[in-house]
Amino acid sequence: MKTILMSALLAFGLEPFATAQQTEPTAQPADASAVKVLQAQTTCPVSGETLENKDFFVEYQGNRIYTCCAKCKVKVVAFPDYWLYRLHSEGFMVENVQTTCPVSGEELDAAAKSVEVGPMTIKTCCAKCAKKVAADPAKYMDVLAGRHAQELCPVSGKKIEGDDSFMYQGVSIRACCPNCEAKFTAEPEKYLKAMTERKEIVTQTEAVCLTHPNEKIKDRTWFTTVGPVRYYFANRECMTAFFREPAKYVPALRSVLPGKKAADAEKTGA
């Protein structure tokens, strides 16, 4: 099961996340050539500096992303998937800090099984639960992140009672009334932020690739979570295209991601 969690506008060769695979019991991924042997995180994904301590971190989907300072932490909080993919492209695995299984809700013990999803590990209480996570990692990432289906109108904040909805970048957004669509489309960043703060999640409904609309999405095995929205890609190449220019496809990301020159400068310390 291939997945995504993101990277920067990198000039050097990006490899997508490896197939989600159980480390116990062993599972043979469909594309073995894409699998990396990752090491524990030792550098900040934003600055590229070696981590001198573990004082600054972001907990995300049961895993912990370390940064070198509070300033870098703020950047990771704004878009964790971007920095996770960046770490993965550099061969790093982030630290798992789960205490319970996302499938059963049971406490984890020494017999816990692991499913690797890119630079992250999702732990489960047993092999049966591990298989469920490997089959649909996004579902259990939502559980670990505390995300839930949309319940409130993004504009009014009222509980949604009717069937009013509108499309935004291939995603169906529910609303309390027809009048809310115009307000949302006028200030999408504002209302998407409100949904993110409530930990709501909406998923792409159109079977059209975000980066290449002429490509159809067949199995939804390549995806990313941007705030409250989950986008899907047709294949590895489409996903990689997104990571090279995220803001090109999701304009709201311009305010939270560096441009290419800024990203290169951060990596070199310039």
Image: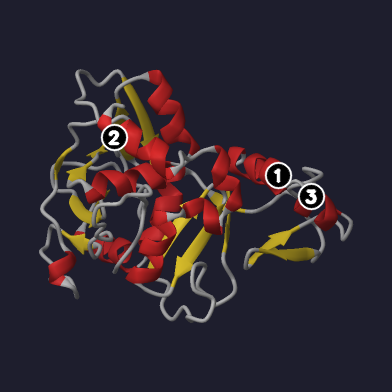
- The residue beneath circle 2 is 267
Can you give x and y, in whole percent of width and height, for residue 76 in the image? 41, 34
Mark 1 surroundings within 10 Å by alpha-carbon count, few (fewer than 14), some (14 through 19), many (20 or more): some
- The residue beneath circle 1 is 191
**Badge 1 or badge 2: first in the primary sequence:** 1
Task: Say above or below: 159 vs 241.
Answer: above
Q: Are marks 1 and 2 in contact (CB under 8 Å)?
A: no
Name the image quarter holding the N terminus: bottom left
User: In this image, 168 relative to 45: left or right?
Assistant: right
Near-viewer residue (122 or 29): 29
Between the residue at mark 1 and the residue at mark 3, the CA separation in whole angstroms equals: 10 Å
Amino acid tagged 3: Ala
Residue at 31% x, 27% y is 270
Q: Secondary structure at mark 2?
A: helix
Amino acid tagged 1: Tyr
- The residue beneath circle 3 is 186
User: In this image, 265 relative to 92: left or right?
Assistant: right
Q: Are marks 2 and 3 in contact (CB under 8 Å)?
A: no
**Badge nearest the viewer, 2 or 3:** 2
